[in-house]
Image: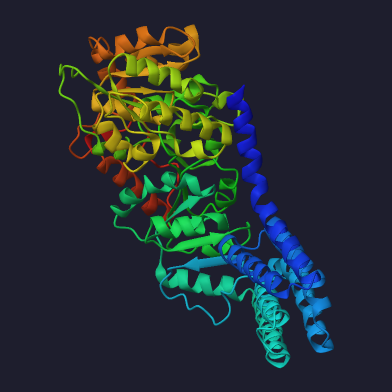
Amino acid sequence: MNRHLASRYQRIAGQALPLVGIWLATILSAWFLLLGSNAGGAVLAVLLLGLLWWRQDRVGGGPQSATHAAAAAAVVLALGFVPTLPDPVLAAGAAALLAFAMAAPMVENQSRPRLEAHRLPGRVSMPLAGVRNPLFKAACGGGIALAAGAAGLLPDVPVAVIVLLFLIAGAATAGYQVVRRRRHLPDREVHAALLAYRPDFYLYYSGRPEGAYQLQMWLPYLERTGSRGAVLIRERQFLDTALAITSLPVLLAESVEPIERTIVPTLGAIFYVNNAAKNVDGTRYQQVVHVHLGHGDSDKPASYAASTTMFDRIFVAGQAGVDRFASHGVLVPGEKFVLVGRPQVEAIEVRPAGAPVPQRPVVLYAPTWRGVLADMQLSSLASGEAIVSALLDAGAAVIFRAHPYAKRDAESRVLVTGIDALLAASPTGGHLTSEQAAALSIFDCMNASDALVGDVSSVVSDYLYSNKPIALAHHAGDRLEAEYPLAKATCLLPVDGDLAAGVRALLSEDSKAADRDTIRTYYLGPWPPEGYSQVFVDACQEAIVVGRHGASVEAGRSPDSTQADS
């Protein structure tokens, strides 16, 4: 009960504190100014307006944040500055700044380019075109000058001049941007630069910043194709993250229409890394090949989603990726599937057959995230403390690798904190908490471990490559092996049963070695280690060529083809 209460309070705090902070600073600054304490009010007003300027520049002009910011600025300007300024010119300037702040969200919506390009060669950035939310910034800048004037730091004439300059600059910049957008100039400029850049493929992403790993896992292998590419994203909140994880050009299209400007004759394929609803916007353009990569091979419902059928090609690691669609009643033409392996597992060290488990084994505990839908509730994180306690009681050292999405909800964060505290308090030492493990790649964690405790997820599928023992935490009971064939190669760890017995089975004699060898081929394909990742690279190159030259997108290699000889 205490954990659930803590989770609820943490969630409320995370949502409310930023807004409360803005309004508190607003009220305090207005209060000081109305009481005649101009210096104190001015300091708070300057801090508030500076914070709002920074927030708009970093986060952007989303309707909610812009409305909150404009409302906060309105209170400061109307209640704080105007009564303290006897000069009618300054009062008029304050009123104009207030109008700018209130109009900023609407004007920003009309002036922001529909298509943006970053790091695109040949893309000439026009002066003032990239200034974000100029009206609101003019209101903030002028408000800071008014605050300084109210505090007696500046005489009236310089304050009036500064306010006038901010008004002129804000209005001119906003007007310039509105005209450019109505004439579709930003879109045309990006399109012209793309024609010159001649991209072969796009890596398409719609989602939150913490999903960056979905792109990062594919970027190195797409680079190996030798093709020219770019990253196409759909949300502004992901822009800074995208620029940080790749050196490729980044295109931002927040709405559907500007995507058409990105489709140029040289473009052969668009690769998709998840099942986001906005993927459908990209697949409208049939002159290129649309390839679903996903972000890991697992038996989760996301790996056999019916929406996947809209893609021209579905890349899967092994035959298991094909069969799970049919076994769940999702009918997909066989020619859409292409077996490509999991190129990322080339980073995993393979344990020699028959190698014994060390006296003090290192166990990687890597639960999946707590899905938001009922059929995605496959995480053992809620039982994580009990699982880790059982591992510690068995004398194991534990590496706790939390899923990146564990940061998304407060309850998961509380659960992660509890497991970290348990490891930190262990007298045996040698453990890695979630923060320490996050400094390593998931494959580094796999290589540092002797066994895995995981859930139904791609982590377990990838760990098959290591030839090390696996325990599958589960709730499914007797249905488990029928629902998840991967379970045949693992020790079963019922989260509501005898965890100690499951841990003993994991760390004692490796009774599942032969099953793992068979299931590994079924899930990850039959290719030998040498050249394993090249199978994926070759498949990407073929998709790009097919799309560029207009060949039938149904001409891809099927699971029955001779890819194993690649």
Can residue 115 be seen? yes
Q: How is the image coloured?
A: rainbow
Nearer to the camera, 426 or 176: 426
Q: Which of 77 and 379 is in front in this view?
A: 77
| Residue 92 placement: quadrant | bottom right
Q: Where is residue 278 in the image (x, y as percent from the top left)?
A: 59, 47
Tally the numbered discs. Answer: 0
Give above or below for 182 relative to 507: below
Relative depth, front residue between 280 and 108: 108
Q: Position of residue 554 (x, y in %)?
A: 45, 41
Drawn side of residue 495 relative to residue 349, left or right: right
Residue 342 lies in quadrant? top left
Is the residue 122 above or below the residue 155 in the image? above
Q: Is residue 377 left or right of residue 87?
A: left
Q: Residue 408 falls in which quadrant of the image?
A: top right
Q: Quadrant of the C terminus?
A: top left
Tell me where residue 448 appears, x and y as whole percent: 24, 32
Whether residue 231 can be seen here? no
Above or below — where is 306 with respect to 517?
below
- The image shows residue 152 at horizontal and vertical percentages of 69, 83
- Which sits in the foreground, 295 or 553? 295
Residue 500 horizontal side relative to residue 53, left or right: left
Q: Would residue 274 be found to the left or right of residue 348 on screen?
A: right
Q: In which quarter of the image is the N terminus?
A: top right
What residue lies at 53% left-to-right and 32% top-to-bottom?
414
Quick one: which residue is furthest to the bottom in this view?
157
**Residue in the image at 39% along x and 61% along y:** 248
